[in-house]
Amino acid sequence: MVNLINLRLPLAFVFVLLLSGVSSAEDHTVLVGTEDNPYIFSEANLVIAPGDNVTFIWTPGQPHNVAQVESSSSNVYVSGGDIIFFYSGEPVDGIEWVLNSTYTQEEGILYYICEPHAGLQMRGQIVIESRPDMTMELGDFPWLSYLLVFPLIGALWCFAFRNSPEAHKYIALSTTLFTLAISVIVFIKAGSGNGFRLMEEYEWAPNLGVSLLLGVDGLSSPLVLLTGIICPLTVIFSWHEKEKPALFFALLLVMQTALYGVFITLDYFVFYIFWEVVLIPMFFLIAIWGGDNRRYASIKFFIYTFTASVIMLVGFMALYFEAGVNSFSMIDIANNSSGFSREFQIWVFAALFIGFAVKIPSVPWHTWLPDAHVQAPTAGSILLAGVMLKMGLYGLMRAALPPLPIGAEFFVPLMVALAIISILYGAVLSLGQTDLKKLVAYSSVSHMGVALLGVATMTELGFAGAVFMMFAHGILSPAMFMVAGVLLHQLGTREIPKLGGIAQSQPTTTGLFVVIFMGSLGVPGMAVFVSELAVFIAFFQSHGYLLLLPIFGMVITAGYHLWALQRAIFGAENESVDIKKVHEAPWYEMYPMFILIIIAAFFGIFPHYLMDPISVASYDILDFMGVL
């Protein structure tokens, strides 16, 4: 005789499993006819997970039914075949009918029509697909917390030693070198695996679902490395800053903390806080150490970026409330986003896209950038172009694409158009500039347009090329601003017509200038070339010969780089140039340029060190979105 008592535990376990399977199924609603149009289904392209239920609710006014058909063009319900199609019955008015999980167990597409109104194209489809959960792996040491804490400590030390003539710059350099070492460790430990690595979580406001959730993957770890590289080079290039140096270096370190926070936090609320904190030190860097028109530039910078971020915050709050998980975690919200309606995704993606596009910056929201760059001190331009501009595209890929795939798909044509316009518009305006710094500013609009074009392809190669472009531009654009800074420090001007004929007086520095210009325009062997090649191949595969438009932008890019180099550095001596002032750049200006050239060449020759982790993260995002 079987001992029923001994069977209670296994039976209970099976019962719990069955209940968990039932409770995990979601209920979806489709209106059969709407008040505006009685001959449509409200969710004509419904995406559900296997085992979900769908409830059809008739809008009173017309008799309808729901009948499964074989294909998207079929108008005939087939009964009695080998495959049992679902059928609500004869056309009626004002009822509800549930398509239960019996019909939604397997992945695929279920096509259906309203029989009496199939001729009016009253049809729909149910896409059944499993969306992979975002995965994460907890870290065994708080590496990411160190990235946030140590720059803040360094900033406090700089301010504490403000009366010392030298201490602040050594504190800033030591702090940024230490965070560089941690950034390299984070990049190596993140590796090329799937999901998030080195996870840390510290509860902040659990009742609201807010926590300091930290983690990196192949999308964020290259940008963490980029931040670690640029910050100590910025400190070195500013080694002889004379005006309020303690405050200057403290602001650089505060900005470093905020930039790290944007790239490693996985909580929407905390992400927004770091996003806003970045604006504060940059505002003061422009307003205090900027050029003659610094007040206008700093206010314009703040208004543009702050207004856009408020719109972005509205999108974040919409995601929080719609997901219904009482958490601002990007992972939790993404894993519970399969029920987001098409209309919701389109509107929220629009809000997020505006917030991120201003920071990229994309035409037509780019006008704050040239003014900010021209008026900012060289250190501010280095951080702005090297790291800060990467926040926009990173935010788009991290915070908007995974939970809003339908919204992203809807805006692909707009993203393609804005990307191509940015490439051409930025290149043409660069060609017409006389201020070298303004030329580099508009070239950033063009280069970041290439990165946006990669995202718009919605392909793994396009995504990888976009992130690679962010890194490559983050290396070579600061080097270009360093060139402008060197010329300004020696000759007191960046005006290209007032320069020229200085190559013979500084041959080593000129050699660095030439390599930097060549790398920025995209010669093979440098990092920019790899990123552009990846993006253009991906764009050709997705959009064909429309590729000729951005390719033409690259022709203009080569033109303005070579023309500016010829006029500013080579050629006959300009009477406006006091040749006696021209000399080799000092060590604190030459070494950062040389280091950036080495890094750009290394990743241009050995791109797989970046491409491998980036490609894995790109695949994960697209797989989660259901694109692959």
Image: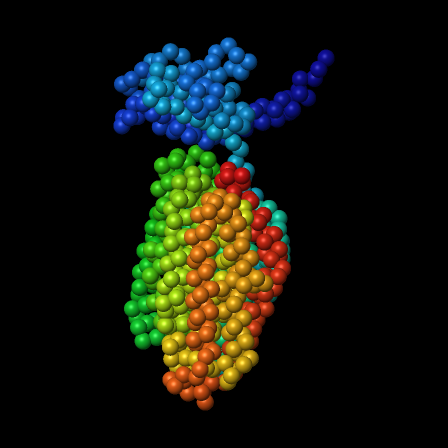
Q: Is residue 400 above or below residue 511?
A: above
Viewer-proximal residue among 219 and 209: 219
**Residue 37 visible in this rendered orientation of the protein:** yes
Residue 485 shows in this picture? no
Tell me the residue at 51%/83% (across/down).
504
Say which residue appears at 43% left-offset and 62% top-offset.
Answer: 556
Quarter of the C terminus within the rendering = top right
Residue sitting at the far right: 1
Q: Residue furthest bottom?
A: 580
Tell me how the rendering is colored. Answer: rainbow
- Where is residue 368? Give x, y as percent: 34, 62
Q: Nearer the viewer, residue 14 or 273?
A: 273
The N terminus lies in quadrant: top right
Q: Position of residue 190 (x, y in %)?
A: 60, 53
Measured from the top left, where is residue 257 in percent x and y?
A: 48, 63
In the visual, does 196 lie left or right of 433? right
Q: Nearer the viewer, residue 605 or 319?
A: 605
| x and y percentages locating residue 118 in the rendered image | 37, 19
Above or below, 121 against 483 in this view is above
Q: Residue at x 42, y 30 (%)?
A: 45
Q: Considering only vertical position in the picture, is 267 above or below 182?
A: above
Rendered image quadrant of residue 250? bottom left
How many marks are shown on the rendered structure? 0
